[in-house]
Image (cartoon, rainbow, N blue to C red):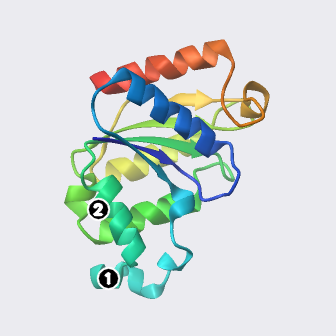
Amino acid sequence: MITVISGTNRRNSRTFPIAKQFYDLFRKSTVEHIELLNLEDLPLDFIHAGMYNPDGQNKVLRKLQDKFMIPADKFFIVSPEYNGSFPGILKLFIDACSIREYKPTFNGKKAALAGVATGRAGNIRGIDHLRGTLSHVGTIVMPDILPLSLVDKICDEDGFITEKATLKSMRKTVDAFLSF
């Protein structure tokens, strides 16, 4: 199973439509089961002092981990640039999932990363930070990343990428990840 993760809980961001495009590309490219996890679905109350105890984990977070993270063999993470890195909510989600079922959630699984930014670098720095975090929890990260730059100029009004060269790069990344 591959889980495509939209790496922000910000409402109406460009990240979710782009993650949805990747989800659709995977569904068209493989018979493997594909899931789409939108971090907008995280419960607001999962952040509390007890979250660092497996018994204190929020029940909704536990269900998300059991449905999207533990059964996945691979993660495809679409992460926007926030303050020169990746969103804190994505880091907090990884931290929270590492408290319960650490190894079944991350260890030995594979990941690919796509950065989203309105600037020219496509969140390369944030993707490097995310790569380090995922490597630390035992996830094997595909060396090739996909920085998606100037997304405010290459997306339609619904947030979907329409620029042909970028669409070609997205397909190439999906194919490479399926072979990874």
Query: Is residue 93 positioned above or below 109 on the image?
Result: below
The image quarter containing residue 1 is top left
- Give residue 118's position: percent from left, percent from top: 74, 36
Q: Which residue is mark 1?
A: 53
Does 159 sit left or right of 54 as displayed?
A: right
Residue type at the position of mark 2: Asp
Residue found 31% across the figure and 57% down from its top: 67
Front residue of this view, candidates 171 and 126: 171
166 relative to 136, above or below: above
Q: Quadrant of residue 76?
A: top left
Query: Residue 119's image quarter?
Result: top right
Q: Which residue is mark 2?
A: 66
| Mark 1 nearby-residue class (10 Å; few <14, some 14–19, many ≥20) | few
Query: Looking at numbered disc 1 in the image, what kind of residue is underneath it?
Result: Asn
Q: Secondary structure at mark 1?
A: loop
Quarter of the figure with the C terminus: top left
Exactly how many numbered labels are in the figure?
A: 2
Observer able to see residue 128: yes
Residue at left offset 72%, top offset 37%: 158
The correct choice, above or below, for 20 with respect to 51 in the image is above
- Secondary structure beneath dot 2 equals helix
